[in-house]
Amino acid sequence: MLALIPVRKGALPAGAQECVDEAGGRAWVIGEETSLASDQLTAEYIWTAEVGPFSPARWASALTRAVHQEDVIILPASPDGRDLAPRLAHVLGRPLLARAILIRPDRVITLSMGTKLMYEVSPSAPFVATLEPGSRGTDPRARAGKPALVHELTLDLGDEPDPKVSEVLPPDPASMDLSEAQRILAAGAGLGSAEACELLGRVAVALGASVGATRVVTDAGWLPHYRQIGTTGVSVHPSIYIALGISGAVQHIGGIGEPAHIVAVNVDPSCPMMAMADLAIVSDAPSLLRALATRLGVEIHE
Ligand SMILES: Cc1cc2nc3c(=O)[nH]c(=O)nc-3n(C[C@H](O)[C@H](O)[C@H](O)COP(=O)(O)OP(=O)(O)OC[C@H]3O[C@@H](n4cnc5c(N)ncnc54)[C@H](O)[C@@H]3O)c2cc1C
């Protein structure tokens, strides 16, 4: 087994050491300033290939000849690892087992649907896998004091075309992954209707916020289930959380992270959500939402 670690300017990706440990201490480090990166790894054997900035298509093509004898190749499920792994699997003509939490030559366990499902696979042929960072852990005592044997390799890159980044656009709060949203405008039962939740969605766009909801709201069908925040919904980590008509049940609060600012609107000044808020507004939530929409120039459909 071999760990393949893509690095940018000497920085190891998340989960790099776990990949090396899972592969039994053998690693290829490829990219820019690979010696700096390999100094941070505990391994038995490290091969470094100094090939410049991240170019997944060119790297995959060049790596085919270099690593084709390895039966199991493990990359971290970091952004660059997830980009390189499927290209490498394709050029090697192998299956890709993505988001693994355990990798053995004849047994792999992968995650699916967030972390809700686990699949066990019994490979009978060589494969490429990505290892989920944080799933395995590392043992700092393993190989302690034994420096790795480092070999510098040259790798000739071909002229395989790589996609070029022309512009990096900010995510659209209306469609971005709720778990990554920095501003959330969340609907509770106190909003009272599907129409109010529809207006909440358009007010959220005007505020550059994403829409969240309690289970009562998603069970009522006012918003889709993937908007549900809480212990049986999505866990979020916003910097500001605005709760309209939400009581603050423990199953909801368990999923909101630790926002720097919480604004709560509720007719009950003593409910848990109001107690948590930096700004607690005792008001009728649908009326306040309409007033906010008017201020922001958001059309209200009667
Ligand atoms: C196993 C289990 C798992 C669960 N998982 C989740 C989960 O993942 N996420 C989740 O959210 N819930 C979850 N729940 C449900 C949770 O226990 C609560 O029932 C739910 O969070 C309450 O949602 P709510 O605050 O919208 O409604 P309510 O608790 O009914 O609160 C409504 C609030 O609106 C206020 N209000 C009423 N009228 C107005 C008005 N006109 N203006 C302003 N405020 C008003 C009320 O004062 C009240 O505070 C789970 C429950 C169980 C048993």
Image (cartoon, rainbow, N blue to C red):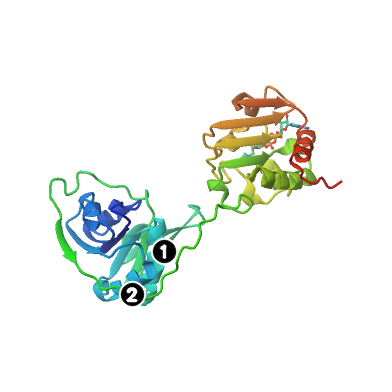
Q: Is 204 located above or below residue 253 in the figure?
A: below
Q: Nearer the viewer, residue 207 or 20?
A: 207
Amino acid type, label 1: Asp
Q: Choose the circle earlier in sequence order: 1 or 2.
A: 2
Residue 280: image quadrant is top right
Report, in whole angstroms, how far the alpha carbon at label 1 lies from the one at label 2. Answer: 13 Å
Furthest residue toward top: 270
Q: Number of callouts in the render?
A: 2
Q: Secondary structure at mark 2?
A: helix
Q: Residues within 10 Å of mark 2 (few under 14, many from 20)?
A: many
Q: Position of residue 29 (x, y in %)?
A: 26, 60
Amino acid type, label 2: Ser
Taking 111 as reference, is 20 left or right? Answer: left
Q: Is 52 located above or below residue 278 in the figure?
A: below
Q: Which mark is residue 83?
A: 1
Q: Which mark is residue 163?
A: none
Q: Is 63 located above or below residue 179 in the figure?
A: below
Name the quadrant where ligand 1 sits.
Answer: top right
Q: Which residue is mark 2?
A: 61
Q: Is 15 located above or below residue 92 in the figure?
A: above
Q: Secondary structure at mark 1?
A: helix
Residue 162: image quadrant is bottom left
